[in-house]
């Protein structure tokens, strides 16, 4: 189902409140206030807070999957360029939408998370593994990569490191003498991203020629 501009605006407002308060503690009233709409509008568009949460996860995950599929299907890129682009897309995604990343990590780590959310997060993680494995197999068969490493190795070392930075943003803002998320995002791209690429090359033993 395609979402209207109004529905997307409500989801974006909910995302901010959920990241700040947690899904359980957040109220529909708070979301309506953030979105500058009447509470009845949320009920009209989504029916309940649970359905709103479900739509938020579906919206974010679907758009990221579409992005990854475009990379996989690109016939002009080498396997390493595809892998590097997946990494950049993931980095851009969590830097641009840190609220959603925090919601996902917090909700997925709960002992009793909402079943629909858990299912969607599982779907996201499994598809990420599938896409990365597909690129690694392609690169290995073409001789670009020296090792046919499991996708889990790439995710744990490279993507896991990025996730750690985002979840500890407050600490690193202070450590690096920065004040805003925008400054943080720029610093990560300029100073941290090159090390991620080096880590990626080491894992797959990619040798530039």
Image (tube, rainbow, N blue to C red):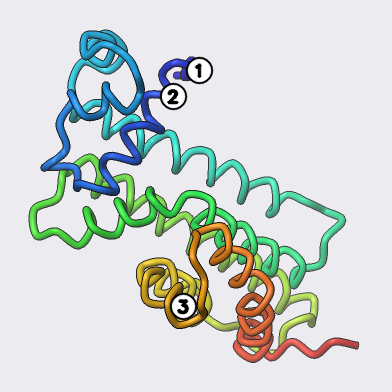
Placement of the C terminus among the 4 image quadrants:
bottom right
- Say few, some or many: other residues with alpha carbon within 10 Å of mark 1 (under 14 / 14 to 19 / 20 or more): few
Residue 25 at what x, y percent from top left? 11, 42
Q: Mark 3 points at which residue?
A: 161
Give percent across and percent down for residue 192.
61, 79
The label on residue 9 is: 2
Q: Quadrant of residue 60?
A: top left
Compared across the picture, whether 172 is left or right of 15 comes to right
The single residue placed furthest to the right in the displayed view is 209
Which residue does the image show at 62% across and 57% down from the upper left? 89
Q: Is mark 1 on a helix, strand or loop?
A: helix
Work out whether residue 43 or residue 68 is closer to the camera in this orientation and state it: 43
Distance from the alpha carbon under mark 3 to that under mark 2: 31 Å
Q: Is residue 151 visible?
A: no
Report the Cα–Cα distance between label 1 and label 2: 6 Å
- Mark number, residue 5: 1
Mark nearer the N terminus (3 vs 2): 2
Residue at x 68%, y 54% (from the top left corner)? 72
**CB atoms of marks 1 and 3 within 8 Å:** no
- Between circles 3 and 2, the one closer to the viewer is 2
Residue 163 point in image, percent of width and height: 43, 69
Tags 1 and 2 in contact by the CB under 8 Å rule? yes
The quadrant of the image that shows the N terminus is top left
- Can see residue 164? yes
Secondary structure under tag 3 reads helix
């Amino acid at each position: 189902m395609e979402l209207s501009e109004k529905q997307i605006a409500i989801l974006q407002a909910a995302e901010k409140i959920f990241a700040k308060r947690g899904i359980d503690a957040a109220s529909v009233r708070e979301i309506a206030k953030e979105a500058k709409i009447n509470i009845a509008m949320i009920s009209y568009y989504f029916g309940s807070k649970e359905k709103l949460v479900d739509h938020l996860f579906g919206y974010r995950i679907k758009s990221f999957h579409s992005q990854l599929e475009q990379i996989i299907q690109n016939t002009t890129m080498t396997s390493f360029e595809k892998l590097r682009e997946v990494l950049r897309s993931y980095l851009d995604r969590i830097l641009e939408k840190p609220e959603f990343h925090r919601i996902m990590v917090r909700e997925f780590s709960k002992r009793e998370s909402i079943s629909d959310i858990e299912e969607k997060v599982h779907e996201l993680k499994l598809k990420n593994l599938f896409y990365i494995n597909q690129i690694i197999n392609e690169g290995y068969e073409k001789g670009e990569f020296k090792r046919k490493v499991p996708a889990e190795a790439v995710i744990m070392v490279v993507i896991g490191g990025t996730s750690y930075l985002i979840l500890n943003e407050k600490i690193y803002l202070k450590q690096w003498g920065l004040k805003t998320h925008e400054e943080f995002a720029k610093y990560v791209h300029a100073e941290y991203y090159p090390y991620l690429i080096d880590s990626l090359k080491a894992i797959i033993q990619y040798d530039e020629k």
